[in-house]
Image (cartoon, helix red, strand yellow):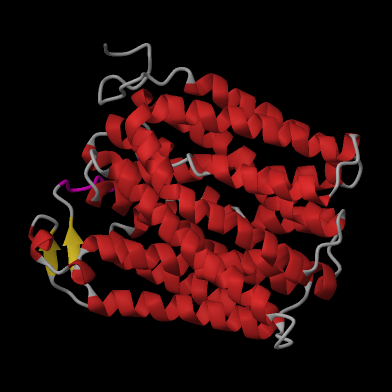
Amino acid sequence: MRLNILPLKSAQNLPFWRGPLFLLCLVAAAQPISFATWSALLNNFVVERAGFTGIEIGWLHSVREIPGLLAVGVIGILMVMREQVLALVMLALLGVATALTAHFPSFGGILVLTMLSSIGFHYFETVNHSLQLQWIDKERAPKILGYLSAVGSGAALLAYGLIMLTWDSLKLSYETVYGLSGGLTMLIALYCAFAFAQFQAPSVQHRNLLLRKRYWLYYLLQFFAGARRQIFIVFAAFMMVERFGFTVHALTALFLINYVVNMVLAPFMGQFIARFGERFSLIVEYTGLSVVFLAYGGLYWFGWGVGVAGTLYVMDHMFFGLSFALKTYFQKIADPADIAPTAAVAFTINHISAVFLPAGLGYLWVVKPDFVFIAATLLALTSLLLVLLIPRHPSEGHETIFTGS
């Protein structure tokens, strides 16, 4: 791994393929190669190989979110390891754990491998969010984050497309697909470790736990975003398998359509946020999500078919594509030295409900699955009310409509 530390300003003289933005693009692609594959196969894998019901899948996702709850541990690690190094180590861990997933098809084995991959995923995401906000200037952030989102969607699209095209025709096994995707993520992490300099942002980051009163609205929005997101991640795709009998091929095709839409729209969403601001963008997101979650309940009340369910799934991801407005909102209100520790704290807050909610709702799912989506609707509406407190032009000292001018 290269030991030379290069100030971010000096990195502007490097070729694009050696610079920090290209590094962000590579890791933005590497993470979903493993995570998208894991997600695409998980529901069928646990049902076919381990006989999971809603109870087991709820516990699995609760365990998966424990490292997210402990994301504040990143602050301690950063005392002895640079953020860029930690991001690549965690990315490699995600790849290794994903590659081994199918070799342990039992409840205990799946839990252990899920925990390891989750440590890699959540710690990588925590540090990656911090690096993005430090390395990208505020003026370009919405557009660049939109492009990075498109890169991630493109990588997931590639993974889903290959699964859909080869799963049946080549009679692939879970072991093969998990192994290849996890191995590729690990190789990209190793390449990034040796091919790039260590980039140094201009602001030295605090290395202690920070909870600032003026960030209270950002903390609350993170809490409700985490709760709402978990309901979708855990139960939306599981519903497709349990209620509509989706096979690996069919579920992957749905994911494929979903990521085609997101890859195309992500850059435009970045431009939308840059033009209309974080407040309006998040109002659009949470209004749309409230309608979508309520419509999920309609699948049970009115007996709507698989076409409606698939459409709702894609629409959910479309609205979620505006969620990085929450990142740029924080970037605008934050002291630059607070970004790394606050990213860790925010990730922990985001996962407080995520640890307990899936397991608890798993029991509700086996009795009244529509109530699970009613809960998600209420969470989205609560987020909508909180977003109304964001000023039209947030800045340091003007974090909410009650502060600044």
Residue 328 screen position, x and y as percent = 35, 37
Residue 158 screen position, x and y as percent = 53, 70
Quadrant of the image containing the N terminus: bottom left
| Observer able to see residue 168 | yes
Q: Is residue 21 above or below residue 96?
A: above
How many numbered callouts? 0
Q: Main secondary structure of the magenta part?
A: loop
Residue 230 screen position, x and y as percent = 64, 46
> Is residue 208 rendered magenta in the image?
yes
Residue at 61% x, 32% y is 288
Q: Is residue 131 above or below residue 172?
A: above
Q: With 379 as the anchor, is 108 left or right in this view?
A: right
Q: With 309 as the anchor, is 87 left or right in this view?
A: left
Q: Nearer the viewer, residue 176 or 227?
A: 176
Residue 238 screen position, x and y as percent = 77, 55
Q: Quadrant of residue 270?
A: top left
Quadrant of the image containing the C terminus: top left
Residue at 63% x, 34% y is 289
| Observer able to see residue 356 | no
Q: Quadrant of residue 43?
A: bottom right
Residue at 42% x, 25% y is 279
Residue at 61% x, 55% y is 258
Write down the region rendered in magenta: 203-209
Hey, which residue is sitting farthest bottom in the picture? Answer: 170
Q: Is residue 274 above or below residue 266?
A: above
Q: Quadrant of residue 64?
A: bottom right
